[in-house]
Amino acid sequence: DIQMTQSPSSLSASVGDRVTITCRASQSISSYLNWYQQKPGKAPKLLIYAASSLQSGVPSRFSGSGSGTDFTLTISSLQPEDFATYYCQQSYSTLSITFGQGTRLEIK
Amino acid sequence: QVQLQESGPGLVKPSQTLSLTCTVSGGSISSGSYYWSWIRQPAGKGLEWIGRIYTSGSTNYNPSLKSRVTISVDTSKNQFSLKLSSVTAADTAVYYCARDLGPYDWFDPWGQGTLVTVSS
């Protein structure tokens, strides 16, 4: 299996901050990387697909970058509704799709 | 727009088989080049992909669960289903169904999720 490691595991930030979450793959996955946001008691919501493409309806303060093994999700100016848990997901190996362990973004 | 809804028993006894169904509305399960996936999440933990099915019936399963998982599709009912055999307490989780879109296999949309507890 391709292992996905996110850092940090948790993060405290304030409204208006710029935040970056990192996802590292155990081997090269090209751009086969997607990002999700999950709020308590809700299903995950797709934010970014193919490493850097913004899903329709997602605010432009969210952006993704990277290729190969290292990827980042950036929120340019945190809003109150952005406090949630974020997951990356690789789809390079479709015989075993895997997720990162999650990054919990909390209010400072 | 397409919506997904999971259904099935919320309580399953150890060693028995967990069975869930995902009903797709707002579009045909057969239209487009989509896979349909099951994903689970134990309380307070991360997401685990269980497996997926194409409308032709072709399947892929997580190697760690492959020996216990069967995913099937019923295009006449616009549904796909999950069976997980020989369950233990470790299989207690919220189970989600989701549409799997290629070529980068992202999941969108998701069902709301259903909690399945394995307990005697």
Image (cartoon, coloured by chain):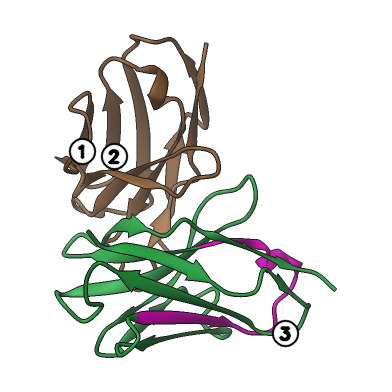
Is residue B81 magenta-colored?
A: yes
Using the numbered discs, state the Cα–Cα distance from disc 2 to disc 3 in whole angstroms: 41 Å
B117 horizontally vs A75: left or right: right
Nearer-the-camera pick, A27 or A18: A18
The residue located at (17%, 40%) in the rendering is: A52
Q: Chain of mark 3?
A: B
* Rendered-image quadrant of the N terminus of chain B: bottom left
Report the disc number at residue A66: 1
Q: Residue at x 17, y 27 (%)?
A: A60
Q: Position of residue B49 (x, y in %)?
A: 45, 64
| Residue bounds of the magenta highlight | B79-95
Q: Which chain is brown?
A: A
| A77 relative to B30, above or below | above
- Residue under circle 2? A70
Q: Is residue B31 magenta?
A: no
Q: Which chain does the green colour mark?
A: B
Query: Same chain for the residues at labels 3 and 1, yes or no?
Result: no
Of marks 3 and 1, the one in the foreground: 3
